[in-house]
Amino acid sequence: MPRNWTLLLTIFFLTAVPEGASAECTGLNERSSTQELLAFLRTSKDLPRERQDGECLTFAIRHLEYKPSPEAEDLLIDYLDFERPLTQAEKNGFMIHGPITESNTYPAIGTLFTFGKSAVPALLSSIEASTSETFRRTATHTLMLISRDQPPMGIEYLNQRATDAEPSKAARLREAARIAVQWCGEKYKKQCEAALREKY
Amino acid sequence: MDRAGTYDLEDLNPGLGGNLIEGKVALDTTWGHLTYGCLTCCGYAPYLSPDPGNVVVNGLLQIDTFGTNNCAGQKGYDLTGYYQSTGVWWSGNSAIARVTAFQGKGMAPGTTTGYGKAVIPNGDGGRPKPPCPQLDQLAGNQIPVVSVSIIQHTSQTTSSGDTAAAEYKSITGTSSLGIRTGTQTGFKACFAGMEFAGTVSPSTYTGSLELRRTLLSCGTFQQGNVSVSCGATPRDDTSSSALRDDDPQPGGVIYDLDPPGVENGDSFQSVYRYRANFSEYATLADGTTVASANPVNYYVRLSCKFDANGNPSLDTTVSGDNQVGSGTTKTTWNLQ
């Protein structure tokens, strides 16, 4: 696509929905290519939150499921603390798009989960580097979803990384390991707690 | 300047007008120093891509032809020209998938092999072989043709093979399905716990598949009969991947969990009424819809009130309320 078309499309995406409105995404659709979805995320990344189109961001993030690439991984990690806008019915308590849970309201969690283990190194790097508690929590949740067949592995990833990290980073990783136990489920809770106590 | 070395020469039109022969390299144009090459043949081992090439019944699969360079071992050489001029294509079982030039078509669930042969240069550079032999070379790719048959579970508990079941339990506080109330912290709710199981054929299929959902129509009400917009319909309502199990292995089954209903309401807005019609269907990971026996069309209707402490209970004042069923429901507050 010519460069000026990309620019025009981007301008259209960013102006298609009024600021802050919670409406259907009109700038992207089922025919949007992976490159268009990534371009939209890239362009929106540096905008202030109130100027971001939450509906289209949600659409783009959800439609990148099973489309892993280094760029998609980096962009989605940047959006781990992006919270999708709720519909009026959801604000009133109706579970129209599933329960109002972390994995449902932070859409990048679910999409990075579909990338599988290839996303683990980038998630660990983001957990140790981020100063945002919300971000570290959603990144840790994603890591535990990727490890949901063997949740103690998720704890081990964090502990192992903490052994070689500098003190401030190690502290974040160990805190992440501590909160990760909540995503182990009853079946693996004891194994996760044992992994948490393990010394590296 | 040293210009001696290895040079790649490619015959762009093999078989047309004779064979490419080695030439000379002028190393010194002042004194006329030439050096002779020693041409060896570097052919290609063809392969078909994608392999496996997943396709749905009645779906089309584009098949690309590439080669691995016999000398360098490098993959990704485009062999389209050879296949366009001399290619012959067929299927190992045309009842499962038909294969024609650069294309496969899914006919029935199962796995077969697509074949394509063409006259392609051969040779591994081991010794000089001008002219390069042009050999009939064969490549194949596995073609799984997929179908998914979906059933809905609205009673008993989540399936043991469903890897999303732990997430469902952590949200709702229970593994039980059906119309229920939940009282765990953060999820005081009336909900219809549902699990969809998609049985995949062939059961050995290893790609990712998804059970997706469309919200066909809905009605949401507070204070018994005051309408609250539930947004435009129809629209996509696919569960977060955390509530899905998209991997058919082991066992050849994929799952989707959803607990639609009302959560964390208050006594002032009670009664909350929820009516919705849905359609559940299966897709490949790229979004291609998989032909299943039928998409599952179903409805959910429930009414919920909350006490002063936020604890939920089902409201039964409307006849026929608090049900999940196949087909559709009216989306009015009183179901009339």
Image (tube, coloured by chain):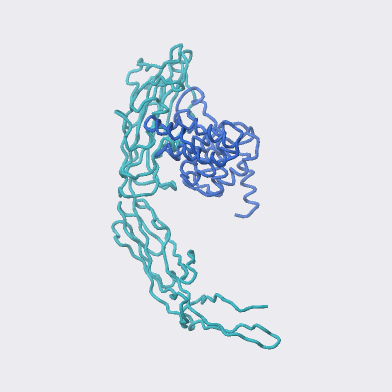
Which residue is at the front of the view, A135 or A17?
Answer: A135
Residue at 61% from the left image edge and 79% from the top image edge: B4
Query: Hey, which residue is sitting farthest top in the picture?
Result: B308
Residue A146 % position (x, y): 45, 40
- Indicate the colour of chain B: cyan
- Indicate the colour of chain A: blue
Q: Is residue B240 left or right of residue A80?
A: left
Which quarter of the rendered picture does the N terminus of chain A lie within? bottom right
Residue B259 % position (x, y): 40, 28
Residue A111 % position (x, y): 49, 41
Residue A187 lies in quadrant: top left
Q: Taking the image as drawn, is residue B336 in sight?
A: no
Q: Is residue A103 left or right of residue B58?
A: right
Residue at 33% from the left image edge and 57% from the top image edge: B97
Which residue is at the front of the view, B30 or B216?
Answer: B30
Residue B60 % position (x, y): 39, 55
Residue at 53% from the left image edge and 47% from the top image edge: A32
Q: Taking the image as drawn, is residue B178 in sight?
A: yes
